Image (tube, coloured by chain):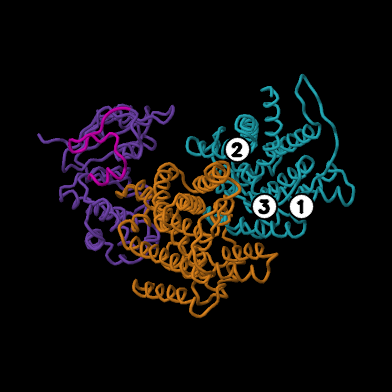
Chain colours: A orange, B purple, C cyan
Amino acid sequence: MMCRWWRCFLFVIWVLALASTPLWAGNYVVRLAVTVAMYTGLALSWNFIGGFTGYPSFSTAAFFGLGSYAGALAQRAGVPMIFAWLCATLFVGLFAAALGGILLRLRGHYFAIGSIGVVEVLRLLIASWGSVTGGGDGLNVPFVTGGPDLVARIFLAAMLAIMLVVFATTVVVDRSRLGFGLRCIQQNEDAADMVGINTTTYKIAAYTLSALFCGTIGAAYASWAGYIDPNESFSLLMSIKVPVMCLLGGSGTVLGPVVGAAAFTLLEEFFWAHFLDYNRAILGAVIVVLIFFLPGGLLRMPYRGLFARTVRAWVQPKAAA
Amino acid sequence: MSTPILELDRVSKAFGGIHALRQISFALEEGQIVALIGPNGAGKTTLINVITGVHRVSGGRIAFRGKDVTRQRPFQAARRGLARTFQIVQPFPRMSVVENVAAGALFGGAHGSMGEAMVAAREQLAFTGLAEFADRPASALTLAGRKRLELAKSLAMKPHLLMLDEVNAGLNSSEIDGALALIRTIARRGITVLVIEHVMKVIFSLADRVLVLHHGELIADGAPRDIAGQQRVIEAYLGEKFARRITRTGAND
Amino acid sequence: MAYLQILVNGVVLGALYTCLAVGFSLVWGVLNIINMLHGSLIILGGYLSFFAWHSFGIHPLVALPAVAMLLFAIGYATQLLLINRVVSEPVLTTLTLTFGLDLILYNFMTVYYTATPRRVTLDMGAVDFAGIVMPVDRLVAMALALLLTGLLYLVLRGSRIGRAIVAVRMDREAAALMGIRVDRIYAVTFGIGALMAGATGAVFAMLYPITTNLTTTFLGKAFVVCVIGGLGSVQGALVGGIVLGIVESLAGQVVGPQHALTVGFALMLLLLLIKPTGLTGIRGYE
């Protein structure tokens, strides 16, 4: 596999490419770059709990949404923007640590359902707590002053900065004791226990890491969009898209989420622009193709002999029957 | 008389209505090789699970090196120096053999860094004869190899007490001899060993002492020769009628 | 409102929820797959029933068997051709696959039927019994729901296929060793799941306006019923459905109808943490 520095190098090149978009492209492309950076951050975050630890979490929207509301409310209370984001990050991190202690007792399907349940309960709570959160009408966030070009650049810088931080965290965790322990848990949780890993603490750490930056991104998104509402912030679609992006690139790897988020976001944008009516169906088709033909993700594809293998994979089902 | 390394005081475990362990009491001295035998379903693996904290006891006390560990969790047992292997091997399938052992060294053996853990892991692999497989995935090993991997992993945890759950099941005669030699070397290093076994050869050639479990009760505790003649033991394995017949014949010798 | 009325409302609702969830529960319990298509299949059944009535004047009760069979065929084919390939994969893979398929179905339904709510309007009046009022169409719906559920129960217990399904649910490998063609059973089970979903949708179309916006709501209810009641059995779906129906009915009274949904989900989360196998204690897979 690639050596550590090569991966970091490629990543930095990609960040620079995204950062340079204001110089050579119009606002549309810059906004697209912001979206790519945002989803890359989310995918890298999910990677901690889903990729490294192997727990299929669908809570991304819960943390994103919570972060966006926390950030929005802080800003409305007069807190300066960046501080609001930091508050949101802290809040979401604490929430995840507390929730994780309870939720991570579940495994497999039940954990997945529980994580979906969290998104739904939060969405419904926020939607009904109108006095504080504006309920179903949504919440307005104080705008950043400046023309559209400047605003786009500011948020591009912000999302890229967050993306860098999450990536750096991923690299550090990947090489650390924590990363090794999480991989052990993923491959055999009982054996990990017996070998001396405090699986509870490790899992909670992974879950908290997966939530932390989603909170930051949510808060930043709220400031960027200027308006949030419960259905958009706690969207189950996002909670499923993000793991799919990770799977697309290769979950559990360091660059996988980066590749996957970029590929998926650009594909989605392409289909939205050209096939508006059917864009969901095409997204669905992309997912189906991904599941059948790219089980390990783009980065793990054995590119040699690909065609023969594809045909064989179709003819021989993976079912245990 | 030094403190026994492991002490069980009237330990019981019930799963709903099933009494898997009843009032088990014994003490292991440091440096012993002890065999734990009994027919299938007697509760041997349950006993190991209860000692390492996989199951919680329904009653009684467990002390390890003088410390009360009745309510410990498995990872705490590992860190304290209580290691065990599994009857059905439990590797980390997608990691390499050396990484598997390094996991034991890093987390259980409390080595400081990954680098140190890998060095210690390679030592253990050399000791158990798996050095040539070090960088292959764990899933590529044969059953005998995986059993050795389990052993290497447990040793990397720097245990004071090592519990081997049917480490010889599924091995052929020469493989068993190899395993026996390994276990003797381990014991010579000062590690107390508890083996769950069905293979008589192992018990007789290895163990200083035998504990016999039947329906969750400890029915015999002593040297191998003495145990083999006891009526209750034969009864447990072969049934009442046969046991009576054998002991009568034996008494006539 | 009298508590008895709330209770009765809850039970009627509960019967509908049971029928809604039993197919989902079966698929989860037997195939170990969380079928994200379930909500959309319900809506599909509703739409088909509506258009049979709207375009051809066919009464929903007559259309019901046809809709059910059609959905069965769709489910069977989908499972055999697509889902079967990933049936042993972990939950992330299978859930994502069914989600992807759902996106496709959802999109086509939205484009074809548009989001305009459709409703079969049958005016059957209401019944008044000992002070409890119940619209007749709801009673009919409840009866249908219970009938369908009962039929499924009988099929599972009595027929060869039914027994095979239960066998596969208990032990996949052992069933295969007994000569049961597991992939066929999977297809049949999924087909039954789709059938029950479509039938429920057809029943719903008589009561409420059908629109694609409801797919997630129905799916959510199916989740909740399964967790509360227990997976893979008709009894589980029945217990879960009735409990959810009563809880929602009560919650609707106490905290208002818009919060009733939240209460349901919160109850589900609570049960996941205390007793994930549900009130009947029948375990699904991990």
Q: Residue furthest right?
A: C57
Say which quadrant the C terminus of chain A sits in.
bottom right
Q: Range of the magenta residues?
A: B59-80
Give the mark nearest the N terminus, 2 or 3: 3
Viewer-nearest of discs 1 and 3: 1
Numbered marks: total: 3
Q: Looking at numbered disc 1 in the image, what kind of residue is underneath it?
A: Thr
Does the stretch in magenta take in B77? yes
Where does residue C62 sit, x and y in percent of width and height? 85, 43
Chain of residue at mark 2: C
Q: Secondary structure at mark 3?
A: helix
What residue did someone put label 3 on? Answer: C187
What residue did someone put label 1 on? Answer: C116
Say which quadrant the N terminus of chain A sits in.
bottom left
Q: Nearer the viewer, residue A207 or C69?
A: A207
Drawn side of residue A148 relative to residue C24, left or right: left
Give the mark nearest the N terminus, 1 or 2: 1
Give the mark nearest the N terminus, 1 or 3: 1
| Same subunit: marks 1 and 2 | yes
Q: Is residue A83 above or below residue C258?
A: below
Q: Is residue A37 above or below residue C122?
A: below
What is the distance, in whole Å, between disc 1 and disc 2 at their CAs? 25 Å
What residue did someone put label 2 on? Answer: C259
Crowdedness of circle 1 by 10 Å Cα count: few (<14), some, many (20+)?
few
Q: Nearer the viewer, residue B9 or C107?
A: C107
Crowdedness of circle 3 by 10 Å Cα count: few (<14), some, many (20+)?
many
Q: Which residue is drawn at the image coordinates 36% and 46% (left, top)?
A: A200
